[in-house]
Image: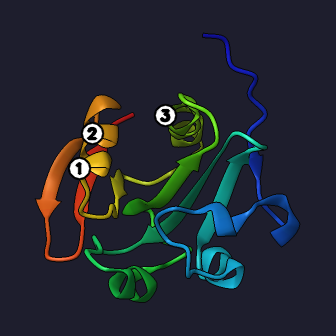
Amino acid sequence: MEYKVELKTVTQPAEVRLEDDPVRKGLSYDFRMSNGRRIFTIPEKAVVCIANTNKLPTTMDELQRFSDPTSDKFSIFYTVWSYERGYGRLILNYVLPLLNTDRYVTLSPKTDMAVRFHTRNGAKMISDNEESYNFEYYK
């Protein structure tokens, strides 16, 4: 399958439909864009939200507390969604080379779908917490 890809860094709320986020519906645009957190999109195809942190978070509260725009320890993928099959994986593959951190880890919901998605995309589960799974990706 051939994909049309134009990866963009989101800078305005109108560039992304946050209400479509199946994982973190309640998070505001301001939360997603503050304290080192960023949003990337392949317009109309996929979205990923990422936070730089100085520690590995296992909850959204820890994600907020550990977020650090100057940290090069962790890039945390805390939500990803796509509008077409294959674009969730594709956006991760396009974003990874842009990040300058030591480790690339998810803060995933405890669902079978999250396990299937991340393991199919080559990530390894590194932690099974009360509120989340952490999967690690390697460049």
Which numbered circle lies on residue 116?
Answer: 2
Q: Amino acid at mark 3?
A: Arg
In this figure, which residue is indicated by the disc labeled 1? 112
Give neighbour class at mark 2: few <14, some 14-19, many 20+ (Cα, 10 Å): few
Q: In the image, is 4 to the left or to the right of 114? A: right
Mark 2 or mark 3: whose residue is earlier in sequence: 3
Nearest to viewer (mark 2 / mark 3)? 2
In this figure, which residue is indicated by the disc labeled 3? 89
Evaluate if marks 1 and 2 touch, with contact meaning CB atoms under 8 Å apart.
yes
Task: Determine whether 132 is above or below 101 in the image.
Answer: below
Confirm whether residue 12 shows in the render: no
Q: Quadrant of the C terminus?
A: top left
Q: Secondary structure at mark 3?
A: helix
Q: In the image, is 86 to the left or to the right of 75? A: right
User: What separation in Å lies between label 3 and label 1 (alpha carbons)?
Assistant: 17 Å
How far across and down, in percent of the image, does residue 72 sit? 44, 62
Mark 3 or mark 1: whose residue is earlier in sequence: 3
Q: Nearer the viewer, residue 3 or 7?
A: 3
Evaluate if marks 2 and 3 touch, with contact meaning CB atoms under 8 Å apart.
no
* Total number of numbered discs in the rendering: 3
Q: Residue at x 49, y 78 (%)?
A: 68
How far across and down, in percent of the image, does residue 95 sit? 58, 42
Q: Quadrant of the N terminus?
A: top right
Which numbered circle lies on residue 69?
Answer: none
How far across and down, in percent of the image, does residue 103 sit? 34, 52
Give neighbour class at mark 1: few <14, some 14-19, many 20+ (Cα, 10 Å): few
Confirm whether residue 59 shows in the render: yes
User: What separation in Å lies between label 2 and label 3 (alpha carbons)?
Assistant: 12 Å
Q: Amino acid at mark 2?
A: Arg
